[in-house]
């Protein structure tokens, strides 16, 4: 298992680099001259040229890329915002926790609400619980989250005044953003869990378990559930990507000072350095979470685990065999 | 999914008996349609989709009010007989704008999905058919694209391309490519080992013909389901982009842009916000109902 | 002949249907047979004839919905299994009646160690601790010739033959009185088939277990069974002792089965049964076999056929051929 984990961790390094390179390359083609954006329209041509030189914008692409990677990964320097010269890393680091809380709590809620809903639906297939859950889930994946967010904001914050209309200074402020950000994921997870469970319930090994005379509860929790969970781990991982991207919009709806809000402000001012850094940071976080998902996979599915410890195990057998032979 | 593919392959094993193959394929299509028609929810979804498509096509002839003309004398009116969904802050009829906006939202959804399909299928075919370094490059490209969460990728690309209808289609379509190529490639790997491919090879069938005429049709059905559901998701993502000042921007009556514009009046004129979301939600719901029905019809095993 | 007290297992008039949204599939249509303790009954027939459904009905593990037992009685050791409560039935499953499934590749839980899969049935029915049960499970593995040190392995680490042995170990873990073996060798290589069959036979003899062996391999029946019942379209068309049925096959379908076997001694062509099994949602009236039967008369198309005694324990539902056979015997 240690081998597997180690291998997966090593594999993440090139991915992180390539993601940074890709984003830098795409953003390189952004329209407009950063120097002009910083100095504002109507700045003198000489000033712009001087700033370009200073920022290294006149260097060839590869040199710029190399500098960028060096600063980002070796010196952890993301540069400064075009708008106010504040170091981006400072902004990101104090905003990041809010975005992360929003994304991670959404995924946790998805798992603890969505999976049981799907399981209940599958075990009561065709019943009214199943139909209700599936209709709700279908609606859940069919309405845009920011629209739902605005409607809930209108009802609970503006009309009823139960919850604060913006900010997350109190815990009540978190309720709506987290709920809205997890809504689509819950629906998706419930649908996935249901179909995964239905597939497993029909499988031969569940029939075998039934033929052994095991009680339904045991069959459900020891036989069906672990197998149904395997594909859901992947769904949860991808869903984390969605909710991470979703924070950009949700933070904007609920005025949460996170990375997403920082990004949206930067979109308005065409502050490319901020957007680039924010996207790279979020993409790296996503990669790390996918890494955790892969490791979790290894723990749940013995077939994956075995791929990586095969050699070890054979060796152990041989030792055991030798011991048996010695005893005989 | 694998099982369906095998079934499909069993139905069309011979490549030489062209006419027989075609009739069989037709009857299979008819079988799917028959099952689809028995699913009431899927039919409902289909009817709604058709209505939206008709609205999109004939929007200029249906609407009663000009979608762009300002009429400040009638601004921010609540829903009434004349203005079913009220008017917006420039006095424009929201219902007319919503109908006209179907063109943009549906166009964005269909356009981006079509782009993703086209490029995704080509890359997936190349990777699955040739293998080796071609496959390696394409698959690593897909890995890379999928390492960046979809929304963020769309944001970055539409930053580069700028806002606008076609640019937004491209920004959203690119994000769909890796998923499609992966699926096609996986299907190709399954199909490549089946006898009918061998048979076609043995008759010295040209590579492009083998790839697109023989293998591709057998790999496409899961992609159809995925793409139907994808149209809905893309419409919502396009609206999300409009919401953060990217994508299609006001004054174009794209639904997301309308929601964005209405947001500042949320406290006073909530109906301006309500209707665009409902319009979008119903279309996406219909697409998802249809997609679900299509999946069940193509693989009846999954249903019962 | 169906004496409830005497017969160890007796199935009477079993009718099972599968219902989907559109159609009703008549899987089993009034099957009646009985089995004595320690004997082996072979259920023979084509794929889709309803053999597996019969076995699963006895264990009451048919998926419901869509499957439904419409009528019938299944007497096992003095009690009607179909009248038992779910809890009572659960105590019989795995303990007194158990089943070996067709496909060993999918019959084992991929996320559980093999010994645990054997042990949980033992722990449940014997009321012993998990730990003791695991010891017994390892003994079972050794009995089916799987070395002890593989007990902690997962199913994917086993070959097909080994998996089937694990399935057999699960089925025999609690010394059942009745074993339902559903094509236990079909998915295996020929050499492994013989091993597995020999193993089942040996274990069965040791514990005086009765067995219903489902197969479409007549050779396997000849080797292992005492009695045989030929199933066609959800009905038993002929049954009797192996000698009776193999040597004096009466029903045209049974004869067709034997004719379609390759025979080393003759040089003639194989004679397959023409046509296909009827669609179980649209079964023909009268004798279900008449569309394929070379001897079909007008009455075969209308009259419902009942099993009629041929001789001894030998029964067939084809009246036309029974009369002919009787004449031959008289002469």
Image (cartoon, helix red, strand yellow):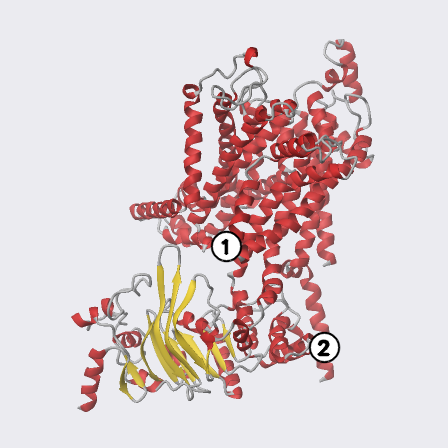
Residue indicated by mark 2 = A322
> Can residue B129 be spotted in the picture?
yes
Could you say where residue A97 lies in the image, as x and y percent from the top left?
Answer: 78, 38
Tag on residue C8? Answer: none
**Residue at 45% across / 61% down in the picture?**
C65
Judge whether C23 appears above or below A165 on screen.
below
Neighbours of disc 1 within 10 Å: few (<14), some (14-19), many (20+):
few
Instruction: Find numbered disc 1 in the image and state the secondary structure of the residue it sits on.
Output: loop
Of residues A141 and A200, the one drawn nearer to the viewer in this rendering: A141
Residue drawn 59% across and 63% down? A220
Query: How far across and down, in percent of the image, does residue A182 sit?
Result: 65, 42
Q: Is residue B161 visible?
A: no
Answer with the quarter of the image where residue C49 lies. bottom left
Q: Is residue C174 above or below residue A169?
A: below
Q: Which mark is residue A127?
A: 1
Position of B125 relative to B8 (above/below): above
Residue B275 lies left or right of residue A328; in this view the side is left
- Chain bearing tag 2 is A
């Amino acid at each position: 298992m240690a081998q597997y984990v180690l291998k997966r961790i090593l594999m993440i390094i090139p991915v992180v680099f390539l993601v940074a390179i890709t984003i830098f390359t795409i953003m390189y083609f952004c329209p407009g001259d950063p120097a002009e954006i910083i100095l504002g329209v109507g700045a003198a041509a000489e000033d712009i040229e001087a700033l370009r030189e200073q920022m290294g914008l006149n260097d060839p692409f590869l040199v710029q890329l190399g500098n960028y990677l060096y600063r980002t990964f070796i010196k952890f320097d993301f540069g400064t915002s075009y708008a106010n010269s504040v170091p981006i890393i400072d902004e990101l680091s104090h905003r990041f926790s809010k975005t992360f809380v929003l994304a991670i709590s959404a995924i946790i809620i998805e798992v603890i609400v969505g999976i049981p809903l799907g399981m209940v639906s599958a075990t009561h297939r065709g019943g009214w619980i199943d139909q209700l859950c599936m209709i709700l889930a279908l609606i859940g994946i069919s309405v845009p989250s920011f629209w739902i967010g605005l409607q809930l904001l209108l009802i609970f914050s503006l009309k009823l005044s139960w919850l604060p209309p913006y900010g997350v200074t109190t815990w009540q402020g978190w309720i709506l953003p987290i709920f809205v950000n997890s809504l689509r994921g819950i629906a998706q997870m419930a649908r996935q869990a249901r179909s995964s469970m239905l597939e497993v319930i029909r499988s031969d090994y569940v029939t075998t378990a039934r033929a052994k005379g095991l009680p339904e509860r045991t069959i459900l929790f020891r036989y069906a559930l672990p197998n149904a969970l395997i594909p859901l781990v992947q769904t949860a991982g991808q869903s984390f990507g969605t909710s991470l991207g979703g924070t950009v919009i949700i933070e904007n709806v609920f005025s949460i000072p996170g990375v997403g809000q920082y990004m949206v402000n930067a979109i308005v001012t065409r502050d490319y350095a901020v957007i680039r850094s924010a996207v790279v940071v979020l993409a790296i976080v996503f990669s790390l979470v996918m890494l955790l998902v892969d490791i979790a996979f290894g723990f749940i599915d013995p077939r994956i685990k075995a791929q990586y410890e095969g050699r070890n195990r054979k060796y152990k057998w041989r030792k055991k065999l030798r011991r048996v032979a010695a005893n005989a | 999914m694998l099982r369906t593919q095998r079934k499909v392959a069993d139905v069309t094993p011979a490549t030489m008996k062209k006419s027989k193959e075609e009739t069989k394929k037709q009857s299979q299509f008819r079988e799917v349609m028959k099952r689809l028609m028995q699913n009431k929810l899927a039919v409902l979804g289909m009817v709604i989709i058709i209505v939206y498509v008709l609205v999109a096509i004939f929007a200029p002839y249906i609407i009663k009010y000009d979608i762009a003309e300002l009429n400040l004398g009638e601004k921010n009116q609540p829903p009434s007989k004349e203005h079913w969904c009220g008017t917006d802050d420039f006095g424009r009829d929201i219902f007319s704008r919503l109908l006209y906006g179907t063109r943009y939202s549906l166009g964005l959804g269909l356009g981006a999905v079509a782009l993703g399909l086209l490029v995704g299928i080509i890359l997936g075919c190349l990777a699955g058919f040739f293998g080796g370094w071609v496959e390696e490059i394409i698959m690593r490209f897909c890995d890379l694209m999928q390492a960046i969460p979809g929304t963020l990728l769309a944001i970055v690309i539409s930053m580069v391309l700028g806002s606008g209808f076609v640019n937004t289609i491209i920004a959203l379509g690119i994000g769909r490519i890796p998923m499609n190529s992966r699926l096609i490639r996986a299907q190709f790997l399954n199909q490549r080992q089946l006898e009918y491919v061998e048979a076609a090879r043995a008759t010295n069938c040209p590579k492009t013909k083998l790839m697109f005429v023989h293998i591709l049709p057998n790999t496409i059905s899961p992609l159809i389901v995925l793409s139907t559901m994808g149209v809905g998701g893309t419409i919502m993502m396009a609206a999300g982009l409009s919401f953060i000042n990217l994508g299609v921007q006001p004054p174009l009556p794209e639904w997301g842009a309308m929601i964005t514009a209405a947001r500042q009046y949320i406290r006073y004129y909530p109906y301006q916000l309500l209707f665009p979301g409902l319009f979008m939600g119903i279309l996406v719901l219909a697409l998802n109902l249809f997609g679900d029905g299509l999946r069940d019809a193509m693989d009846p095993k999954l249903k019962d | 002949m169906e004496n409830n007290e005497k017969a160890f297992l007796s199935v009477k008039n079993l009718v099972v249907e599968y219902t989907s949204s559109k159609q009703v599939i008549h899987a089993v249509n009034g099957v009646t047979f009985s089995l004595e303790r320690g004997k082996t009954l072979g259920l023979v027939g084509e794929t889709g004839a309803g053999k597996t459904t019969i076995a699963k009905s006895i264990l009451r593990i048919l998926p419901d919905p869509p499957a439904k037992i419409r009528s019938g009685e299944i007497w096992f050791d003095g009690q009607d299994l179909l009248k038992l409560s779910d809890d009572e039935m659960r105590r019989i499953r795995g303990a007194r009646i158990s089943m070996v499934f067709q496909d060993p590749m999918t019959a084992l839980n991929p996320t559980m160690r093999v010994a645990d899969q054997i042990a949980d049935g033992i722990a449940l029915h014997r009321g012993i601790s998990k730990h003791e049960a695991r010891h017994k499970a390892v003994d079972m593995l050794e009995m089916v010739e799987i070395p002890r040190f593989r007990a902690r392995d997962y199913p994917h680490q086993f070959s097909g033959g080994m998996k089937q042995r694990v399935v057999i170990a699960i089925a025999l873990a609690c010394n059942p009185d009745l074993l339902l073996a559903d094509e236990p060798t079909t998915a295996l290589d020929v050499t492994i088939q013989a091993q597995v069959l020999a193993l089942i036979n040996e274990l069965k003899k040791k514990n005086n277990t009765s067995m219903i062996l489902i197969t479409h391999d007549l050779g396997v029946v000849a080797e292992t069974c005492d009695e045989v019942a030929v199933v066609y379209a959800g009905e038993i068309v002929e049954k009797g002792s192996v000698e009776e049925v193999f040597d004096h096959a009466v029903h045209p379908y049974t004869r067709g089965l034997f004719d379609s076997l390759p025979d080393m001694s003759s040089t003639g062509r194989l004679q397959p049964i023409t046509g296909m099994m009827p669609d179980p949602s649209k079964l023909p009236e009268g004798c279900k076999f008449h569309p394929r039967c070379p001897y079909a008369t007008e009455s075969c198309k209308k009259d419902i056929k009942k099993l009629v005694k041929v001789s001894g324990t030998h029964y067939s539902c084809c009246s036309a051929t029974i009369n002919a056979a009787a004449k031959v015997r008289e002469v």
